[in-house]
Amino acid sequence: MTNIIYSLLLLISIFVMFDANGANQQYNNMMDNNMDCATTAMPQGIDPQLLPNKNSQSAQTFIKYCSQCHRVPGPGLHTSAQWPSVIERMNKRMKMMSQDMMMMNIKAPTEKELALITEYVTQNAQQAMTIDEIAKINSTNGEKFKQVCAQCHALPNPAKYPKSAWPSIIKRMRANMLNMGKTPPDENTTNAILNFLVTQAKY
Ligand code: HEC
Ligand code: HEC
């Protein structure tokens, strides 16, 4: 009799161990995902009020899905050539996490919504300079621009932005630099860059 009870207890404890392993595995998965968040760079994010056509359906879809884990990224962070692979990586993550009940209620977009998001970010993407255009920069101010402004994204093409846009973009980039642990340039360098951008701006 004691033998039977003993065997039963042993069996139960094995089951408990298995269960604990399962829970551990889930816990580890969760920690991995959290580590993922902690160790790789989340985008700096942008004030949603500054998003182009912020009330459009595509902007709203972008905000809805792409601010679930980090602040909504500025579409100007990547070029239209770069965005699709980033979106694909994020979509995989959303799909995976939307199936896991432990993962803070993450929702994944439908195919249609994903297409809207991709269209939105590629249409409002960084207007980068080509390698040829960069090679033609030969002024001191231009050199400063190259040094400072390609640290986090492709070098933007000043000719694709209106003159009037630059002062506020420069101001925002200073904040981005401070938030991302990079030293912003001193006042002289900042003015030199602004000067370059404004003289290159086409309209
Ligand atoms: C389920 C959580 C989650 C959601 C939802 C999510 N992201 Fe991310 N995102 C992350 C994590 C974690 C990282 C850092 C690791 C990495 O880059 O893969 C990240 C990093 C980024 C980066 C910076 C890295 C890079 O390659 O530039 C961008 C930009 C970005 N996400 C855009 C998006 C967009 C666009 C969406 C919506 C389509 C989105 N994210 C939705 C978790 C998420
Ligand atoms: C510390 C990283 C960092 C540096 C350095 C940086 N940027 Fe940015 N930049 C960002 C981020 C993040 C975004 C996307 C979010 C945003 O628009 O604020 C961005 C977006 C942009 C955009 C797209 C804005 C739009 O509205 O389409 C332009 C243009 C730009 N940066 C210009 C510059 C210039 C010029 C410099 C040099 C003075 C610079 N950046 C330096 C981080 C940086």
Image (spheres, rainbow, N blue to C red):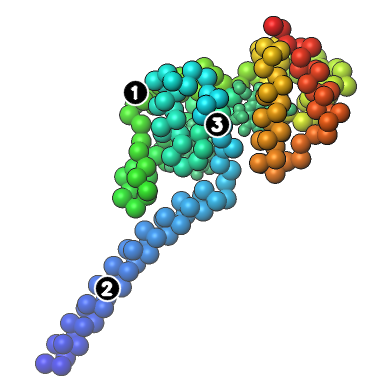
Which of the two discs, 1 and 2, sits closer to the camera? 1
Disc 2 target residue? 16
Query: In which quadrant will I find the N terminus?
Result: bottom left
Distance from the alpha carbon under mark 1 to that under mark 3: 25 Å
Q: Earlier in the sequence, mark 1 or mark 2?
A: 2
Q: Residue at x 76, y 17 (%)?
A: 197
Front position in the image: 199 or 21 = 199
**10 Å neighbourhood of mark 1: few (<14), some, or many (≥20)?**
few
Question: Is 109 above or below relative to 120?
Answer: below
Q: Position of residue 196 (x, y in %)?
A: 80, 17
Q: Earlier in the sequence, mark 2 or mark 3?
A: 2
Disc 1 target residue? 112
Distance from the alpha carbon under mark 2 to that under mark 3: 49 Å
Residue 130 visible, this orientation: no
Query: In which quadrant will I find the C terminus?
Result: top right
The local secondary structure at tag 2 comes to: helix
Q: Amino acid at mark 1?
A: Lys
Disc 3 target residue? 47
